[in-house]
Image (cartoon, rainbow, N blue to C red):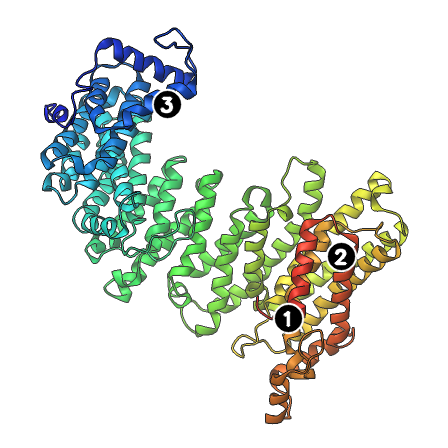
Amino acid sequence: VAPQRHSNHLTKSTKATRYPTMDQQQLAQVESLCETLYTGAASTSESGEPITRAEAQSRLLSLQSSADYIPQCQYILDHSQSHYARLVASNSLTELITTHWNNFTIPQRIDIRNYVLGYLANQGPTLQDFVVTSLIKLVCRITKLGWFDDKTHRELTADIEKFLTATVDHCVLGLKILNQLVDELNIPTTGRTLTQHRKTSVSFRDNCLFKVFQLGLHTLGQLQSRQIAANPRQEAILGEQALSLVVRCLNFDFIGTNPDESSEDVGTIQVPTSWRNVLQRPDTIEMLFEFYANTDPPRSSKAMEAVILLCSIRRSIFPTDKDRAEFLGHLMTGIRELLKNQTGLQHQENYHQFCRLLGRLKANYQLSELVKADGYLEWLELCSSFTVQSIRNWQYSTNSIHYLLALWGRLVAAVPYVRPETGARGHVQALEKQIIMVVEAYVDSMLGSVETVLREEGALDDPLDDDGSLKEQLDRLPVICRFQYGPIANYILSKYDPLLAKYREMMNHLGMSATSGAPPDVQQQVAIVEGQLTWLTYMVGTIVGGHSWSSAHMGDGDETIDASLSRRTLQLSQGVEYRLTSSNGVGRADPKLEMALLYYFQNFRRVYMFMWDQVSGSGSIGGSVSMVGMMAAKLDSAPSTKQKVYQRMFEHLGMGDHTAVANLIVTKVGNNLKFWPEEEDIVSKTLELLLDMAGGDNRS
């Protein structure tokens, strides 16, 4: 790479003569201050007083106070051997350029850009990474701010190609610059309007981004075919940078939606039509799968992230359904081979990204397309085995399980819209079989997790304590379980009934005394049973709460299954309340079980209590007459389908009508407030339930 000539225009940009130059003595002072700031090394002021880190930082920040300091920053970069001094100079230049951009003429801006590029070309391979990163940010910031000033700024990509064709170290530098350039043009800069940002971003997207994307893919191809003579360490860095570049390009905000950077959820990738040929080519996705299979994290996980993004490109990028089906075929073939060989899944990063891929696949492709793909039934079976294995190893996959549950939820939700004869023969029956296996594994593993966590005595996180992950899993369960509701409910009841009987026996044995006063082995047994009942209560709560009143999704007889599951949970609640009140608050259950019961009541109330108006003509708990109920009665005296379902549910429940259940809930609320005043979470959820009951609110 030919270095750019250092221009005298840099020194011409100063507006005053107060700081015309910097000498070696001043440079030594700056270097000493930098050492104090970054390493804590001792330094003294002109008067011999020791300088603190805070004072060193204050003095160095003065370099960012005026554009007059730009020559000093250049002097530091040219003459200092201190990496920290170079970092301070580079950061100061970035801040000065951003803040005082309008103080420079167009030629001065170009000269500053050329100076930094030349400095990177000459010094880059010998600099510390943090200095290189700062200098790259500087050149990319100049490029962004000056994008419409002169075509030179818009030709940065062409300049960087010279880096890519020079030494291996320069190639790494070039890829780092391109990565930062995509970020800089994609993320709004403080102090610039969103309109200015979008104008620059769209111009970059239309003129440069595809070329940058191709450079990333080309580098990956060269690495794969061994065209770059690099040692293993350099190969690893090149691969990571090239993959990061591909991911950044695909993650670009193509249409100005400003996506949430903190979210892992990938929406539809709105790539321009001009990218079609490269994205559609089989060798693109095959190269990424091969790169995944032959490398370790972070390269392999980045390759999988790129596959996720390719899986998410918009439907209309493919000219015909046949082209889209061919792309899906290559994608599913890669997934099948990976699942067969368990390639790279022993690494946590790879495993997590692969779960994201499976969760994303159905989000972007319809079930009717999947069932037509070659090897769909084999793919389904492999996915089921992988899901069961993942759930059984829950301690390593807690944050990934919900992606797998999302896949199964989306598959079953689409079944009513696909004809059974479409695609692979017997695909509905195969899905029914796999769903039962997945849910049974989930129930068994979560119940088993209770004893595992207790046995580890704090060394293992309890999945019940991870509210975010727990909620994500519970949100996915209803649609999955209701697909085969009868067999799955029976399986849950086969676990629930023995545990309920065992818990009653334990409570009778403990009587009015606190659990904490029992022998250690009894305490542990109670903790295990209460923990398992907590899981079952959460599961029943979310499944019952998933009852749909839509005629398209309401299964015949589902309400009687809801009643069977609810009866056990209500009986559990009655037992907990009886011991609590009869012992005057001494015999309290595990707070987690209390939280699970509140979760169940909130879901049951939302699904079945809102029918009060239409059945009994009573509104909120206060018993005010509902106008809706009166009008409904006048218009149609015959009970509606919803009313029949509602009545059948309470008849099968066998615990009285809705008023009896309402009384049970209200009693629960009162006891919680009386006996759990110090538990903020329980009090908060209890008051939330009371508020919703009193207001007759049936919203989720």
**Residue 191 x %, y %:** 29, 43
- Residue type pointed to by label 2: Asn
- What is the spatial separation of the Cα atoms under label 2 and label 1, in whole angstroms? 20 Å
How many residues crowd around disc 3 within 10 Å: few (fewer than 14), some, or many (20 or more)? few
Numbered disc in front, either 2 or 1: 1
- What is the spatial separation of the Cα atoms under label 3 and label 1, in whole angstroms? 58 Å
Report the residue marked by disc 2. 672
- Residue type pointed to by label 3: Ser
Report the residue marked by disc 3. 58
**Residue 29 x %, y %:** 31, 12
Of labels 2 and 3, earlier in sequence is: 3
Identify the disc placed on residue 695. Answer: 1
Query: Quick check: marks 2 and 3 in contact, CB under 8 Å?
Result: no
Q: Is residue 158 left or right of residue 398?
A: left
Residue located farthest toward the top when viewing the structure as drawn: 48
32 and 338: which is toward the camera: 32
584 and 20: which is toward the camera: 20
How many residues crowd around disc 1 within 10 Å: few (fewer than 14), some, or many (20 or more)? few
230 and 539: which is toward the camera: 539
For residue 663, say whether it is visible.
yes
How many residues crowd around disc 2 within 10 Å: few (fewer than 14), some, or many (20 or more)? many
- Residue type pointed to by label 1: Gly
Query: Where, by quadrant of the figure, is residue 603 drawn?
Result: bottom right
